[in-house]
Amino acid sequence: MKLAKSRSSRPLLNWVLAQGHELLAFQVKRSGGEYSVLVTPQDGARRLYVKKLDDSARAFHLHAALVAGFREAGWTSVAYR
């Protein structure tokens, strides 16, 4: 079976956390064989954090660690996909 490469720009994982009126999106995106972990304000105007990795497991682990750290600091999960 041949697997087709995804052409979707949708993230593989997207969590939104809130604190007060601030919203941050924590995402994992794939482009070819590279995975990007991003933290952006919900409006998407700029990127606060970007880390590129070659391994999906490391990308998902980093995403989980970032979300856990923010939740421990008082941020609340409001959406995930």
Image (cartoon, helix red, strand yellow):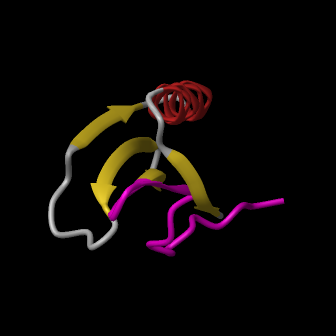
Position of residue 35 measured from the top left corner of the image (x, y, whole percent): 44, 42
Residue 43 forms part of the magenta stretch: no
Residue 8 forms part of the magenta stretch: yes
As drawn, is 25 to the left or to the right of 80? left
The foreground one among 57 and 43 is: 43
As drawn, is 52 to the left or to the right of 35? left
Residue most extreme to the right: 1
Q: Quadrant of the C terminus?
A: bottom right
As drawn, is 65 to the left or to the right of 41? right
The number of numbered discs placed on residues in the rendered structure image is 0
Position of residue 78 measured from the top left corner of the image (x, y, whole percent): 59, 61
Residue most extreme to the front: 20
- Going 50% across and 71% down the picture, which residue do you hit? 10
Residue most extreme to the left: 46
- Going 44% across and 72% down the picture, which residue do you hit? 9
The magenta span reads 1-25
Q: Is residue 73 above or below residue 7?
A: above
- Going 44% across and 28% down the picture, which residue do you hit? 73
The foreground one among 19 and 77 is: 19
Q: Quadrant of the N terminus?
A: bottom right
Kindly indicate the quadrant of the structure image that contains residue 37.
top left
- Going 54% across and 24% down the picture, which residue do you hit? 58
Position of residue 71 measured from the top left corner of the image (x, y, whole percent): 53, 35
Position of residue 59 measured from the top left corner of the image (x, y, whole percent): 51, 33
